Amino acid sequence: MSLAGKRFLIIGATQGIGRALAALVAGQGADLIVASRSPERVAKLTGELAATGRLTGKVIDLTDPASISAGMKAAGKIDHLAIPGSAVAFGSFRELDVADAMASMLSKFWGPYQAVREADFSARASVALFSGSASRKPIGAAALTAINSAVEGLGRGLAHELAPVRVNVICPGLVDTEMWSRLPNGQRGEMMEQARRRLPARHVGTAREIAELTLAVLLNPYMTGTVVDIDGGGQVA
């Protein structure tokens, strides 16, 4: 279960869960490739992690098929692939523009679909896709529920078709990341505190906690075809 000498690609590595995963993997002897759609963020992250070992930055935009093709070709033989990054619009069924819903599906489903399809995997490689707890417990955003459910179905299908390459899906609940920075500080803090009181774990997840679980799933040779929930007990709240 060592990372030494393994090529590890993270698409969506410059924020949130992806950034936490990159920090966790860096320095463990892996040939780490960090990718996102923002050249500036990729450059910043590679500069911050440069002293930890073998590290490469790539620009991969999950909404751009040409960018995905070029990035996956440049990545070479992959041992571990994690795709936590996506751009998803939130909104109720009647309020969310159809074009925004379609763009969200492109980023979170079709982008990872193409990335996995074009990856050059080693014989015992592993993949972590990411859905979200709206697949289990709708929150008034039908498109998000559908997209997350589609990702989970894709993970199960790929685990069957790509074997012995292992494919699992991480399904986080509420995680306190930069995604919520668009909210005023007071509103964000109130939302997190309300969630903390509601959840059986009495705790809101952090990017680091999701990253630790993701790495454990990627490295466990007996896990494939699973959807792993990490939501503080949100499904039973």
Image (cartoon, rainbow, N blue to C red):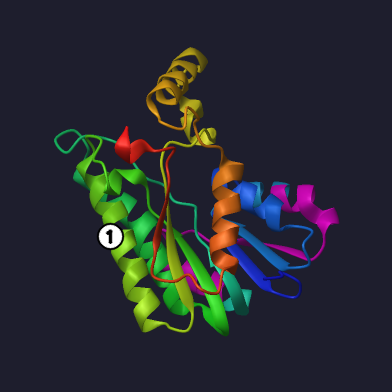
Magenta region includes residue 64: yes
Nearer the observer, 6 or 56: 6
> Which stretch did the figure color magenta?
45-72
Vertically, is 107 above or below 184?
below
Inspect the image, locate mark 1, and give the three-letter code of the amino acid beneath it: Ala
Q: Quadrant of the N terminus?
A: bottom right
Q: How many neighbours does mark 1 have within 10 angstroms: few (below 14), some (14-19), or many (20 or more)?
A: some
Residue lying at 78% horizontally and 47% vertically, measured from the top left: 48
Q: Quadrant of the C terminus?
A: top left
Hey, which quadrant is residue 197 in on the image?
top left
Magenta region includes residue 231: no
Residue lying at 65% horizontally and 52% vertically, measured from the top left: 42
Please state the horizontal and vertical placement of residue 76, each as a whole percent of the image.
62, 79
Residue 92 is left or right of residue 176, and the answer is left
Residue lying at 39% horizontally and 38% vertically, measured from the top left: 233
Q: Residue furthest right?
A: 51
Hey, which quadrant is residue 28 in on the image?
bottom right
Q: Residue furthest bottom?
A: 123
Vertically, is 204 above or below 75?
above
Please state the horizontal and vertical placement of residue 91, each as a whole percent of the image.
26, 35
Secondary structure, mark 1, is: helix
Please state the horizontal and vertical placement of residue 71, each as a whole percent of the image.
56, 70
Residue corresponding to mark 1: 150
